[in-house]
């Protein structure tokens, strides 16, 4: 069966290279994410919710410095208008000159890596809250279950069934027992509900400077430095949004760059010379395949609170 590709279209170009695949990877919340598909032709499909309505968009690499986009749904025109900002085509990396040879080599190999600036704060926030203090596998299973149930069908000729994430009001009124059945503990579900009540104020953070945006996000009980950074990496295009408090990151940075583990404080101190590009440096290590951490012990077990 051949899927007909139509919809509104736009091609954006940049003066330098654009590495579409690595740039948009953070939007995908694991295998089977109902909001994301990647097809064998290399296209990246995403279902999202713009202020003007739901949108499905398809992005393809149309040249070393170009990305072609098609979009469907009420939010299509707004999405296409925002696309250059989303892909951070205006960012300036001339001041990024890492001294560590591994980071420098990764930057040389992947000059097209861009940050992401979707401007969609709440959409980035909910899955980040779900990933707090639990295995990523469990968090993404919860995301799939809740989005399939409470999201809406994605507009357009999607390559497989896709869902638009629920809006803030829907997240706000999901019953506590339904969160429980999706393996979301009361603390995380409460944080989602509180954030949903403040969604309009949180969306304003997209127009603030990074420090003010982080402060706005952290006015919600249950949102700390790690969660605010995870949102900034996707919604604000912040190249310095370091995920301090991540269970693995400090150790990975230490083993990769120094051959020994670090804790959060030591990682922050070590990466200080890379400001304002600390997150960019971490992403480069990830996509270059250099990020590593030895395995010394069995993996901790997954927790299933639905049995409680």
Image (cartoon, rainbow, N blue to C red):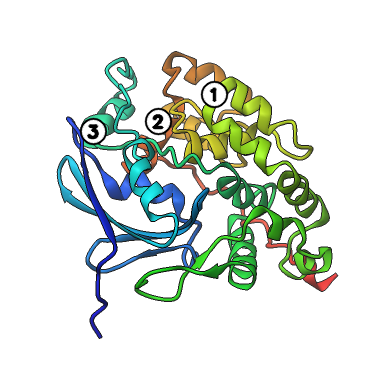
Q: Residues within 10 Å of mark 3 (few under 14, many from 20)?
A: some
Residue at left offset 34%, top offset 73%: 157
Q: Which residue is mark 2?
A: 280
In this rendered view, identify the residue nearer to me: 71 or 15. 71
State the residue lying farthest toward the right.
308
* Lower sequence index among marks 3 and 1: 3
Image location (x, y in percent) of residue 203: 60, 38
Q: Residues within 10 Å of mark 1 (few under 14, many from 20)?
A: many
The reply to whether dot 3 and dot 1 touch (C-beta < 8 Å) is no
Residue at left offset 44%, top offset 42%: 292
- Residue 26 drawn above or below residue 176: above
Residue at left offset 73%, top offset 41%: 198
Residue at left offset 40%, top offset 30%: 280
| Distance CA(mark 3)–CA(mark 1) | 24 Å
Image location (x, y in percent) of residue 75: 44, 54
Quadrant including the C terminus: bottom right
| Distance CA(mark 1)–CA(mark 2) | 15 Å
* Lower sequence index among marks 3 and 2: 3
Badge 3 element? loop
* Lower sequence index among marks 1 and 2: 1
Q: Residue 282's image quarter?
A: top left
* Mark in the foreground, 3 or 1: 1
Q: Residues within 10 Å of mark 2 (few under 14, many from 20)?
A: many
Quadrant including the N terminus: bottom left
In this rendered view, identify the residue nearer to me: 305 or 247. 305
Badge 2 element? helix
In this rendered view, identify the residue nearer to me: 4 or 21. 4
Image location (x, y in percent) of residue 181: 76, 71
Q: Which mark is residue 111?
A: 3
In this rendered view, identify the residue nearer to me: 148 or 273. 148
Q: Which residue is mark 1?
A: 210
């Amino acid at each position: 069966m051949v899927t007909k590709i139509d919809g509104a279209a736009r091609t954006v170009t940049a003066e330098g290279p654009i590495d579409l695949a690595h740039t948009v990877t953070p939007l995908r919340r694991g295998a089977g994410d109902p909001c994301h598909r990647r097809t064998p032709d290399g296209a990246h499909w995403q279902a999202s919710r713009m202020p003007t309505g739901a949108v499905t968009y398809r992005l393809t690499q149309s040249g070393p410095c170009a990305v072609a986009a098609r979009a469907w749904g009420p939010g299509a025109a707004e999405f296409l208008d925002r696309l250059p900002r989303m892909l951070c085509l205006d960012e300036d990396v001339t001041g990024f000159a890492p001294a560590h040879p591994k980071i420098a080599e990764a930057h040389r190999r992947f000059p097209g890596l861009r940050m992401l600036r979707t401007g969609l704060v709440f959409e980035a926030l909910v899955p980040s809250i779900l990933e707090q203090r639990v295995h990523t596998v469990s968090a993404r299973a919860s995301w799939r279950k809740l989005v399939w149930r409470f999201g809406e069908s994605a507009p357009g000729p999607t390559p497989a069934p896709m869902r638009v994430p629920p809006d803030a009001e829907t997240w706000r009124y999901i019953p506590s027992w339904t969160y429980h059945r999706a393996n979301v503990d009361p603390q995380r579900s409460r944080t989602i509900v509180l954030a949903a009540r403040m969604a309009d104020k949180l969306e304003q953070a997209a127009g603030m400077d990074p420090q003010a945006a982080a402060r706005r996000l952290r006015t919600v009980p249950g949102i700390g430095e790690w969660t605010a950074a995870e949102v900034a990496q996707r919604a604000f295009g912040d190249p310095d949004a370091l995920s301090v408090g991540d269970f693995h990151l400090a150790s990975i940075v230490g083993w990769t760059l120094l051959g020994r583990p670090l804790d959060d404080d030591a990682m922050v101190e070590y990466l200080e010379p890379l400001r304002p590009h600390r997150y960019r440096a971490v992403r480069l290590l990830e996509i270059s395949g250099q990020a590593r951490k030895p395995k010394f012990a069995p993996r901790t077990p997954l927790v299933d609170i639905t049995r409680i």
